């Protein structure tokens, strides 16, 4: 997956999470699921593109 594609997926998932929170609240099961999906994408990005840039 290209860097730009991953960034676009992250932004899409952020928007989805925001909308789910508005509809279901912070502690609903569906909100937690969306948050975990966003976490997975962010961790992937950090591993692929940021890990080697830390001094």
Image (spheres, rainbow, N blue to C red):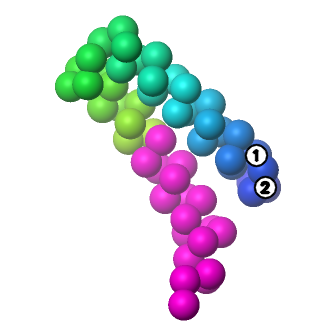
Whole-percent x, y for residue 37 in the image: 45, 39
Q: Is residue 29 visible?
A: no
Whole-percent x, y for residue 17 in the image: 45, 27
Q: At x 33% / y 25%, what residue is drawn? A: 31
The quadrant where residue 13 appears: top right
Which residue is denoted by mark 1 in the rendering? 5
Magenta highlight: main SS = helix
Q: At x 41% / y 17%, what residue is drawn? A: 20
Q: Is residue 17 magenta?
A: no
Q: Quadrant of the N terminus?
A: bottom right
Q: Does residue 51 sit above or below 22 in this rendering?
A: below
Which residue is denoted by mark 2 in the rendering? 2
Q: Is residue 24 left or right of residue 9?
A: left
Q: Which residues are magenta?
A: 38-55
Whole-percent x, y for residue 34 in the image: 41, 31
Q: Does residue 15 sit above or below 6 in this rendering?
A: above
């Amino acid at each position: 997956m290209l860097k730009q594609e991953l960034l676009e997926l992250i932004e899409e998932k952020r928007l989805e999470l925001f909308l789910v929170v508005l509809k279901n609240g912070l502690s609903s099961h569906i909100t937690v699921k969306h948050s975990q999906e966003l976490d997975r994408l962010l961790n992937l990005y950090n591993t692929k593109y940021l890990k080697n840039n830390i001094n």
